[in-house]
């Protein structure tokens, strides 16, 4: 077909067979951001959001999501994650999420890092939407990956 690994010769979706791959240390870093009004950001910064500590809940949500990526993305392999770190930092007009995921396995953790960032940012939106329904999530992307046959990659 096109050389895409998730398609068979007839173009049908399939889960990639990683049985013959070597177990290696693998790591991926992803990022994304949510921009919002000054008032919403101030409320989050000072812990004034009625639903609770937005950053703490978003961090836990992102970590939980990384662990459940194969339940959300149909062709992802379930992975034994050895680390999920999620940083949420407030800047001048929003919050930046950065996730680092690691495993010792036969396939990479890029989707887990991207899922962690995405769900953390969606959680920020959910918790603060009463303050600003116009928040914008953008820039979700892979920053780096290491390990595996294809080696290291950086954006």
Image (cartoon, rainbow, N blue to C red):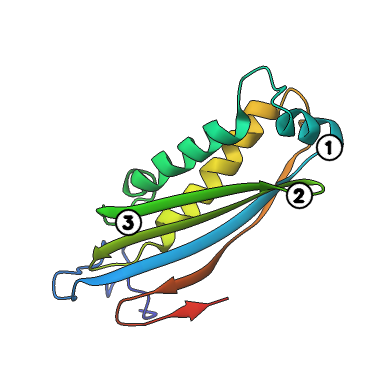
Q: Is residue 40 left or right of residue 128?
A: right
N-term-proximal mark, 1 vs 2: 1
Marked residue nearer the N-terminal end (1 or 3): 1
Vertical comparison of 63 with 1: above or below: above
Residue pushed farthest top?
Answer: 50
Q: What mark, if any, has residue 37 been given in the picture? A: 1
Q: At which x and y percent is residue 117? A: 53, 50
Cα distance between the residues tagged 2 and 3: 33 Å
Task: Kindly identify which residue carries mark 3.
Answer: 76
Quarter of the image with the C terminus is bottom right
- Quarter assignment of residue 54: top right
Residue pushed farthest left?
20
Q: Secondary structure at mark 1?
A: loop
Identify the residue under disc 2: 91
Between the residue at mark 1 and the residue at mark 2, the CA separation in whole angstroms equals 12 Å
- Badge 2 density bin: few <14, some 14–19, many ≥20, Cα 10 Å: few
Tell me residue 65's x, y (percent). 42, 42
**From what the image shows, is residue 141 above or below residue 90?**
below
Q: Is residue 14 above or below residue 4?
A: above
Q: Is residue 107 left or right of residue 122?
A: left
Distance from the alpha carbon under mark 1 to that under mark 3? 36 Å
Left or right: 8 as drawn, with respect to 112 = left
Which comes sooner in the sequence, label 2 or label 3?
3
Q: Total label count?
A: 3
Residue drawn where x is 60% and y is 43% of the image: 121
């Amino acid at each position: 077909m096109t050389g895409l690994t998730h398609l068979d010769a007839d173009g049908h979706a399939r889960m990639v067979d990683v049985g013959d791959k070597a177990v290696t240390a693998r790591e991926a870093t992803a990022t994304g951001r949510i921009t919002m009004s000054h008032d919403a950001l101030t409320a989050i910064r000072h812990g004034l959001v009625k639903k609770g500590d937005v950053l703490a809940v978003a961090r836990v949500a992102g970590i939980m999501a990384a662990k459940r990526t194969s339940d959300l993305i149909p062709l992802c392999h379930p992975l034994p994650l050895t680390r999920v770190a999620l940083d949420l930092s407030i800047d001048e007009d929003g919050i930046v999420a950065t996730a680092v995921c690691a495993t010792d396995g036969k396939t990479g953790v890029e989707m887990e890092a991207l899922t962690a960032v995405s769900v953390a940012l969606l959680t920020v939106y959910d918790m603060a939407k009463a303050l600003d329904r116009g928040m914008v999530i953008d820039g979700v992307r892979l920053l780096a990956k290491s390990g595996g046959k294809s080696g290291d990659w950086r954006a």
